[in-house]
Image (cartoon, grey):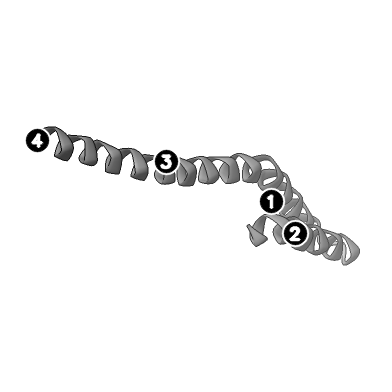
Amino acid sequence: MLYAYISPFIILIAMFTAAFFVIDWLAKLFIYTFIVNLMCLPFFMLYKEEVSQRNTQSSPQEESNHVSKNTDSQ
């Protein structure tokens, strides 16, 4: 989660540093990296959270299924 907050700032600082030193291709690389990171990272973080919630929700359901099977057999 820390990566989601820090990485855009690091990329932005690097972009301005590259622009300050007038390194055109490096500035473009940092701009494109920042844009891709800004566009893709929220969806990646949402997907990661959804997968973790799905894993935590599936565990109790599996346990309850096992419990109901055990009570029926007795």
- Which amino acid, mark 2? Ile
Which circle, 3 or 2, is nearer the viewer? Answer: 3
Which image quadrant is residue 15 in? bottom right
Q: Quadrant of the N terminus?
A: bottom right
Q: Residue furthest right?
A: 20
What residue is pinned by disc 3?
57
| In this view, 14 is above or below 67 | below
- Alpha carbon distance from label 4 to label 2: 60 Å
The percent coordinates of residue 62 (x first, y second) are: 28, 40
- Secondary structure of residue under mark 1: helix
- Alpha carbon distance from label 2 to label 1: 7 Å
What residue is pinned by disc 2?
11
Q: Are marks 4 and 2 in contact (CB under 8 Å)?
A: no
In front of the other: 40 or 67 = 67
What residue is pinned by disc 1?
33
- Which amino acid, mark 4? Ser
In front of the other: 66 or 40 = 66
- Alpha carbon distance from label 4 to label 3: 25 Å
Q: Are marks 4 and 1 in contact (CB under 8 Å)?
A: no
Q: Earlier in the sequence, mark 2 or mark 1?
A: 2
- Alpha carbon distance from label 1 to label 3: 35 Å
Residue at 42% across / 41% down in the picture?
A: 57
Which circle, 4 or 2, is nearer the viewer? Answer: 4
Q: Earlier in the sequence, mark 4 or mark 2?
A: 2
Q: Quadrant of the C terminus?
A: top left
What residue is pinned by disc 4?
73
Q: Are marks 2 and 1 in contact (CB under 8 Å)?
A: yes
- Alpha carbon distance from label 4 to label 1: 59 Å
- Which amino acid, mark 1? Thr
Q: Earlier in the sequence, mark 3 or mark 2?
A: 2
